[in-house]
Image (spheres, grey):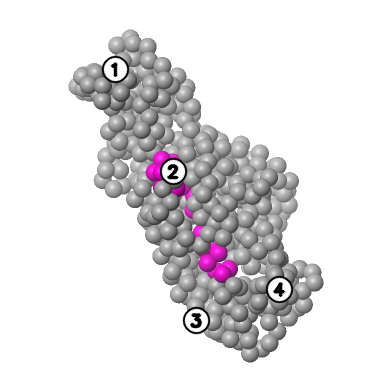
Amino acid sequence: MSKKHFWKRGIAAACAVVTAATGLALPVFAADTSGLAVTPKVVALGDDCLAEVSGSESAVSYMADYLGGNAVNYATVGTTSGKLVSDLQSNQNMKRDVQTADVVMISVGVNDFIEEVLYKNADLVDMDNCKTLTDVANKLTSDGSKLSAANSKLARDLPALVETVAANIEAAVTEVKSLNRSANVVVQTVNNPLGVDYYGMSGVSQNRKTVIAYLYQYLDVSLEGGNVSGTGLASMTIADNAGLNDKIRGLQNASAADFYTPYVGAAGEKAIGFEFSNIMDLNMTFTPLGQVMLASAAIQSSEMLSCGDGSVISNAYTATGKDGDLKSNRPSADSIITGAASHQKMACSMGDADASGSIDTQDLFLCLYNIARVGAGLDTELNPIQRKALDADNSGTLDSQDIFLWLYYMAQTGAGVHVDLADYLAQNQA
């Protein structure tokens, strides 16, 4: 049935339901739910951290499995913040997937800093033929004047880079929200790529390990604020609340998947970045444990994402074989993962947003109320499973078409007409 014909035949019945609803008790307007599964769509954007690694699950696929949905992953190794903004404005496939997403996960920024510190700093290191972090360490300059020039360049350029990356991330979030006001947007804080046990690296001289420690400081202050100072170092100060990660945590239209401290370690803790990432191979793709960690941090970033099946995270954590070690070596990271693993999935089905077991006027109210919120430029008060349950036409947005489709369905079933919900929804896809 065409939508145009559908509207002509259905509008009278839908209006009758709306009119009658003002004078009848809610239970009269209820259709048994068929238990049709809700399948939220999770889209990943950005860099190495969310990119799929051959032979392992990605954080976005864990998030999708946790919500009972599907994943679309646009994250690629090497993506910078500027490249992400450009892609969001020009990649039509990406834009279409963002428009229909229920959750959008973003990770970007680390490559901007790797590029600035290593690839644009010829006084510091010649990156030609470097394939591992050990190669980089062994090619770091030992010339005092070159090292001084490299440090001065970092102190001069990194504060401006913080502002540039922050502006790009905000622009990316704004672009996502312009495409899809309803989606939950989660942005990962940027981890220090040198948050590893570099003093334990074999085959690297102590002097060069000291240089890595200096570079770590410049990156750490860029990300978390503070001051770089010391013998041979060019002073650099960024206010404690003005580091890049502070700006990410302060984004208005996104939640922050924040595990910076569990990644690099608090004061006195051994750095275990090699356990989470593949930075030894000069990229910031994540290990299986790192992917579980990132998915868990994303889940824990917002109460709206506490609606999924925590056993997905629990099983993935156990499968890494690292759960016992992490509990001992980094309790703060373990607590994020176990927190995500404790959630129980909300038992919604299509049309049944309140998990009552029927499609009724309470579901219609939730749909109408949240359509009004979105129309007023506000976020919905529904979690992604609930929103997907009410998205009758699978457009990715709650709108008047959805409320009409549910009203018509209830009118038909209320009149004793059998309607196969799966077929009905399939015939009315956006």
Kindly report the distance in space between the C-alpha atoms of the residues bearing marks 1 and 2: 32 Å
Camera-side residue of 27 and 124: 124
**Residue identified by numbered label 4:** 137
Q: Amino acid at mark 4?
A: Ala
Q: Does 122 sit above or below residue 379?
A: below
Q: Residues within 10 Å of mark 4 (few under 14, many from 20)?
A: many
Query: Residue at the location (55% across, 72% down)?
Result: 116
Q: Which residues are magenta?
A: 94-115
Type of amino acid under label 3: Arg
Helix or strand or loop: what does disc 1 sit on? helix
Q: Quadrant of the N terminus?
A: top left
Which residue is most to the top?
416
Q: Is residue 133 magenta?
A: no
| Residue 156: assigned label | 3
Q: Earlier in the sequence, mark 1 or mark 4?
A: 4
- 398 to the left or right of 189: left
Query: Badge 2: few (under 14), some or many (20 or more) residues near its Cα, within 10 Å?
Result: many
Q: Residue at x 71, y 54 (%)?
A: 328
* Label 3 or label 2, whichever comes before in sequence order: 2
Judging by the rendered image, the residue that carries numbered circle 2 is 97
* CB under 8 Å between discs 1 and 2: no
Dividing the picture into quarters, in which one does residue 30 lie?
A: top left
In this rendering, is residue 94 above or below 198? Answer: above
Q: Earlier in the sequence, mark 3 or mark 4?
A: 4
Q: Distance between the Cα atoms at labels 3 and 2?
A: 39 Å
- Displayed quadrant of residue 267: bottom right
Q: Which residue is mark 1?
A: 411
Element marked by disc 4: helix
Where residue 203 sits in the image (x, y, percent)?
80, 72
Q: Earlier in the sequence, mark 2 or mark 4?
A: 2
